[in-house]
Image (cartoon, rainbow, N blue to C red):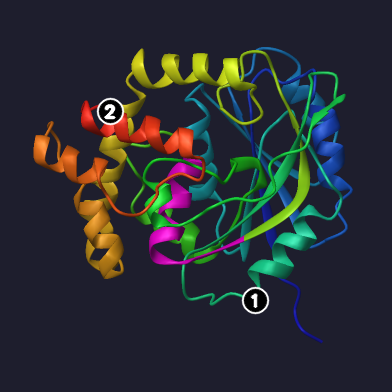
Amino acid sequence: MKEEKSVAILLSTYNGEKYIKEQIDSLINQTYKNVHIYVRDDGSTDKTLSIIKEYKNITIIEGENKGFIKSFFELLEKVDNVDYYSFCDQDDVWREDKVERSVEMLSKLDESKPNLFFSNSDYYDIDLNFVAHGEKYKVYNFRNSLVECVSQGMTMCINKVTRDMLVKNKPQNCISHDCYIYMLCAGLGQMVYDDEALVKYRRHTKSVTAEGKNFIELQIWRIKKFLLSDSLDLIRKQIIEFGNLYREELKEEDKKVLSLFMEEKYSFILSIKKAFYPKKFRKKLSDEILLRILFIIGKM
C-alpha cells in the first residue's frame, strides 16, 4: 500500500477570536487525515489563543507581532520533514475535501521541482453569507507572476522542495508570501490550478486584496495601493531580489522578460520595451492597458 503523503496546515493568527473556531473546525473535518495543524499566533491580545488551546493535536507557537508575512515564514522555518504545506488564514472556511484535492493534484507533478497547487474560492460577507462566485478561468505563468498574484494564499499548497527553497533563501523584499511563492513556482517549477471553489473567502470591508471587489471598489483600491503607497516599489525590489537569486535557472524567454524589470532606477528604454512587449501580462484588456501606462510613467 502506497504511503500517504503528510500535510502541514500553516495558520497565522492575530486577534481572530470572532472567526477562528469556524476555520479550525473546517480544518479538523478534512477528508484527508494525514494532516497536522501548526498555528503561530502573531501577538494576539484577545481570546484567540485560548480558543485554539481548547483543541487537541494542534501545535501552537506563541510569538510577538511581526505581521503575517514574517509569521508565515517563521512557520515554514519551524516545520520540517513534511511532504506538503498548506497556508491558512484565520477567518475563512475550507471545503472538506480541500486538502485531499491538493494532495491528489500535487502528487502527479515532478517532486524534484518547486510545485504549487492553488484553487478557486467563493466570496462571502463577514457573517458567511454567500456574495459571489470566484472567476474560474485564470491565466498563470511567469510573465504574469511579475505583475500580479492570481494564487490566493489560503488556497495554496506547496511541496517540500518549494518550502526548502523559501527557507534557504528567505526573501528580504516580499510584498506577500503568496506572491513570492507564485513567482518562484511559475519560474522554476510547476503549477496546478483547481477551478473548484475550495475556500469560503470571508470578505471584510477593509480587506487588503483586490479579489471580489466591484468595479468602483477595485479602482479605489488600485489608486491607494499602487499610486498612494510604496507597493510598486516593493514589487520592484521583490523582482530584483528574485532575479539575483534565480535568473540563470529560468527558461530563456522568462530570462528576457525578467531583464526588463531588473532596473533599480527608472529607465526610459526599458519602460518603453515593457510597454510594447508583444505578449500580454494580464488577462483582461483594461488591466493590461493600465499596466502598460504604469510601465511608461515608471511606476512599474
- Side of 200 relative to 280 (left or right): right
Which residue shows up at 40% across the image and 56% down it? 142
Which residue shows up at 41% across the image and 38% down it? 288
**Residue 103 position in % (x across, y down):** 71, 65
**Residue 223 position in % (x across, y down):** 42, 16
Q: What's the residue type where badge 2 is placed?
A: Asp
Point out the image quarter for the C terminus.
top left
- Side of 182 relative to 132 (left or right): left
The correct choice, above or below, for 54 with respect to 65 in the image is: below
Q: What's the residue type where badge 1 is placed?
A: Lys
What kind of element bears circle 2? helix
Label placed on residue 201: none
Q: Count the labels in the image.
A: 2
- Between 21 and 55, the one nearer to me in the picture: 21
Between disc 1 and disc 2, whose residue precedes?
A: 1
**Which residue, given by chain and number where applicable, does mark 1 sit on?**
108
Q: Tag 1: Cα neighbours inside 10 Å, few (<14), some, or many (≥20)?
A: few
Label placed on residue 233: 2
**Residue 37 position in % (x across, y down):** 72, 47
